[in-house]
Amino acid sequence: MKNWCKLIKLDKHDVAVMRLSTTEDGEHVQVIGRFPGGQFIKTASFDDQIESANKFFKEFNKKNAVKLVEELDKLLEKEDV
């Protein structure tokens, strides 16, 4: 599969987005954010909806990645308290 992975570069952290497909488990898109001391991995599952998974992968952009990182930063700050 061509264009199955992309890296969205942000100021503080980078976010990897991978398009995964298996005949057994269906269609998936995995989003990975790396942080000091760990990483966040979220997998969006689309059953056998290839078009929906492709659209999600294609449309996941810098704006989505920034929002994700901001929310994760808030969660990490709460754990430091």
Image: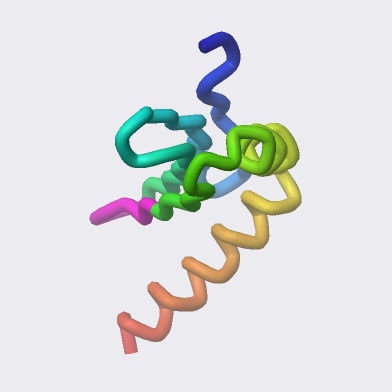
Please state which of residues 64 and 37 is positioned toward the viewer in this rendering. 64
Instruction: Identify the image quadrant of residue 79.
Output: bottom left
Q: Residue at x 70, y 33 (%)?
A: 58
Residue at the limit of the structure toward the left, as seen here: 37
Q: Nearer the viewer, residue 71 or 20?
A: 20
Please say if 23 is above or below 31.
Answer: above
Do we see residue 9 in this rendering? no
Residue appearing at x 40%, y 85% in the figure? 78
Protein image colouring = rainbow
Which quadrant is home to the C terminus?
bottom left
**Residue at the (32%, 52%) spot, across then down:** 39
Left or right: 33, with 4 as reference point: left
**Residue 75: percent from left, percent from top:** 44, 77
Magenta residues, start to end: 36-41
Q: Residue furthest bottom?
A: 81
Where residue 24 sits: x, y (%)? 31, 35
Residue 8 visible in the snapshot: yes
Q: Residue furthest top?
A: 2
In the image, residue 40 lies in the stretch drawn in magenta: yes
- Image height check: is 27 above or below 68? above
Q: Is residue 62 above or below residue 1?
A: below
- The answer to whether residue 10 is left or right of residue 72 is right
> In the visual, does 49 lie left or right of 33?
right
* Residue 9, picture quadrant: top right
